[in-house]
Image (cartoon, coloured by chain):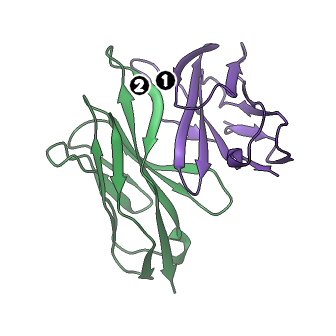
C-alpha cells in the first residue's frame, strides 16, 4: 500500500542555516505530494504541494521537488529562522482509478525542527 | 474565506462515555476528512465524506462513526470511549473533484482527553 517515510527528528539548527528534511514515498500511480507544518497547539497548515513529476512546490522560502525516479519529495530552505520552529509532515494523496483523489492523506511521522537564535 | 472550524476545541470525558465532534468546512467545499493524531501513532485517517456519503474509511473500530449534512458540515462520534482515544482530532476540507483542487485544508482540531 501507499506509505511515506520521512527523516526522524528532532532537527536542531542555528538561525540562517540550510535545512533539508528528507521524504520518500511508496505509491501506486501518480499521487500528489504535500508538506504540512504544525505549530504548537495548532492544526496543520499547508506549506507547499506538487501534483506531478518534476513539479516544484514553493512557499515562504521553502521548496520541494517531486522526483518520480527517486520517489522523493525533500523539503529545503536556504536560511531558516527561529519562527520556522515547528513539526513538518510530508504527505501523499492517493488516486482513484478514475484519477480523482482518494480523499485520504497518508502522512509521514513528522520531523520536529528547532531553530536557535 | 473563513477557514475550517471545529468545535469544541477541548473536551474531557471519562471512559465509557460517548462524544460528538463537529466540523464546518470552508464554504463551497464538499469533502470533509477526519484524522486522529497521537504521539504514538502519528496522523491516521479516520474517514472521508463527500456529498453526505462516506467515500473512504480508515482502519478504526466501529465505535468511530461520522456523518455529513446537506450543508457539508460534518460530525464524528466516538462511543464507549477508551483511554487510548485521547488524541487531537483534526478535520480537513477539500473542494475535491476530477479537475478540482484536492488540497486538504485543516481546522485547529479538537483535543480530547479521556480519563
Q: Position of residue B48 (x, y in %)?
A: 56, 25
Q: In this rendering, is residue B66 above or below B21? A: above
Q: Is residue A35 left or right of residue B74?
A: left
If the image is split into quadrants, where does the N terminus of chain B sit?
Answer: top right
To which quarter of the image does residue A100 belong? top left
Name the residue at 40% across, 81% down: A16
Element type at mark 2: strand
Camera-near label (1 vs 2) is: 2
To which quarter of the image does residue A89 belong? bottom left
Q: Chain of mark 1?
A: B
Q: Position of residue A37 (x, y in %)?
A: 51, 56
Residue B108 in view here:
no
The residue that label 2 is drawn on is A101
Q: What color was chain A assigned in the picture? A: green
- Asked if the residue at tag 2 contacts the one at tag 1, i.e. Cβ–Cβ closer than 8 Å, the answer is yes
Residue B104 in view here:
yes
Q: Is residue A105 left or right of residue A38?
A: left
Amino acid at each position: 500500500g501507499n506509505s511515506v517515510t520521512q527523516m526522524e527528528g528532532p532537527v536542531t539548527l542555528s538561525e540562517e542555516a540550510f535545512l533539508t528534511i528528507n521524504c520518500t514515498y511508496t505509491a501506486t500511480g501518480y499521487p500528489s505530494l504535500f508538506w504540512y507544518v504544525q505549530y504548537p497547539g495548532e492544526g496543520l497548515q499547508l506549506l507547499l504541494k506538487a501534483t506531478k513529476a518534476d513539479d516544484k512546490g514553493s512557499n515562504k522560502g521553502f521548496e520541494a521537488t517531486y522526483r518520480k525516479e527517486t520517489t522523493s519529495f525533500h523539503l529545503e530552505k536556504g536560511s531558516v529562522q527561529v519562527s520556522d520552529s515547528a513539526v513538518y509532515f510530508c504527505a501523499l494523496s492517493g488516486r482513484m482509478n478514475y484519477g480523482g483523489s482518494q480523499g485520504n492523506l497518508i502522512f509521514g511521522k513528522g520531523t520536529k525542527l528547532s531553530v536557535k537564535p | 474565506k473563513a477557514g475550517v472550524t471545529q468545535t469544541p476545541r477541548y473536551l474531557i470525558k471519562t471512559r465509557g462515555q460517548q462524544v460528538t465532534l463537529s466540523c464546518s468546512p470552508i464554504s463551497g467545499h464538499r469533502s470533509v476528512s477526519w484524522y486522529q493524531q497521537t504521539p504514538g501513532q502519528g496522523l491516521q485517517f479516520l474517514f472521508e465524506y463527500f456529498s453526505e456519503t462516506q467515500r473512504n474509511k480508515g482502519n478504526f473500530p466501529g465505535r468511530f462513526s461520522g456523518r455529513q449534512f446537506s450543508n457539508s458540515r460534518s460530525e464524528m462520534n466516538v462511543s464507549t470511549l477508551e483511554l487510548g482515544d485521547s488524541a487531537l482530532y483534526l478535520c480537513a476540507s477539500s473542494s475535491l473533484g476530477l479537475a478540482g483542487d484536492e488540497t486538504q485544508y485543516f481546522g485547529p482540531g479538537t483535543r480530547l482527553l479521556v480519563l
